[in-house]
Image (cartoon, coloured by chain):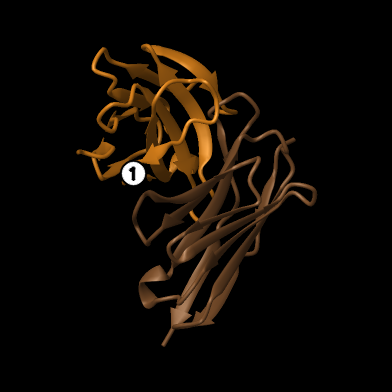
Chain colours: A orange, B brown
């Protein structure tokens, strides 16, 4: 039973560039949430996708956008990268959106913006 | 607004018990979670407790929930060097899947 997978594992970009991160949910899950974890901090919720739509969003600017595909996998896109976007980006999957569903996390993508 | 607080560091001797504490402000969470993060890795779900429970035991792990004081704790019995990691408590905002995390407690286990 495959867990949550993310790609790539590491990424280096320069300011102003755009980046796309990918996530495949755990088998049987249909909901994907994205979190940003800055160094030394707890993860911060970016947004959640269910039925190919953004359902919930945290306090992140519009430069952060996403997509969910019919197979439930998801992408996180960040435009106009800033130095402060350097972080570990975590994807979590769960089943349904009834509130308080247990979320299982992937290994993360570490993004460095120079 | 919502807030989850944890102490930053805990150091214990191998074989002793570890107790990691967490306080939260949003009392409407249905579940409260403990996640473990090893260096350079993602988050591993350790255990969770439903909000109408006071205690949950899972092998070496014991979770205590005091809803009146909005206090959650994780006790690890017979702590091993492999338990060295950062531990996060987290809870969802009411009727959402938006998990709010604490800052994490770094547990160091020495021989």
| Residue lying at the far left of the rendered structure | A1
Residue B80, percent from left and from top: 40, 76
Point out residue A90 in the picture as x, y percentages from the top left corner.
39, 40
Viewer-nearest residue: A38 or A49: A49
Q: Is residue B68 left or right of residue B53?
A: right
Q: Residue at x 57, y 27 (%)?
A: A58
Is residue A41 at all visible to an observer of this figure? Answer: no
- Residue B50: where, in percent of width, then height? 58, 41
Residue at 57% over, 45% down: B90
Placement of B53 over or under B83, stated as above or below: above
- Between residue A63 and residue A55, name the one nearer to us: A55
Q: Mark 1 — on which chain does it sit? A: A
Residue picked out by circle 1? A108
Q: At 42% across and 27% down in the image, what residue appears? A: A80
Within 10 angstroms of label 1, few (less than 14), some, or many (20 or more) residues?
A: many
Mark yes or no: residue A58 visible: yes
- Residue B40 vs B4, above or below: the answer is below
Establish if B58 lies above or below B50: below
Element carrying mark 1: loop
Q: Is residue B54 shown left or right of residue A28?
A: right
Quarter of the C terminus of chain A within the rendering: top left
Quadrant position of the N terminus of chain A in the picture: top left
């Amino acid at each position: 039973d495959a867990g949550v997978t993310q790609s790539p594992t590491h990424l280096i970009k320069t300011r102003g560039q755009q980046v796309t991160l990918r996530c495949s949910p755990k088998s049987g899950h249909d909901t994907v949430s994205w979190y940003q974890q800055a160094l030394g901090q707890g993860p911060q919720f970016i947004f959640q996708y269910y039925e190919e739509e953004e359902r919930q969003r945290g306090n992140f600017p519009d430069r952060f956008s996403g997509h969910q595909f019919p197979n439930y996998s998801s992408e996180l896109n960040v435009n106009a990268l800033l130095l402060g976007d350097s972080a570990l980006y975590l994807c979590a999957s769960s089943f349904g959106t009834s509130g308080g569903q247990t979320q299982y996390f992937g290994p993360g993508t570490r993004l460095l913006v120079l | 607004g919502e807030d989850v607080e944890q102490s930053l560091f805990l150091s214990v001797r191998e074989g002793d018990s570890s107790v990691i504490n967490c306080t939260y402000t949003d009392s409407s969470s249905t579940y409260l979670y403990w996640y473990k993060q090893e260096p350079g890795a993602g988050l591993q779900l350790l255990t969770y407790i439903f909000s109408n429970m006071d205690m949950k035991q899972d092998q070496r792990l014991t979770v205590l929930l005091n809803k009146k004081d909005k206090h959650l704790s994780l006790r690890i019995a017979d702590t091993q060097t492999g338990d060295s990691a950062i531990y996060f408590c987290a809870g969802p905002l009411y009727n959402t899947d938006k998990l709010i995390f604490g800052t994490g407690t770094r547990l160091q286990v020495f021989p």
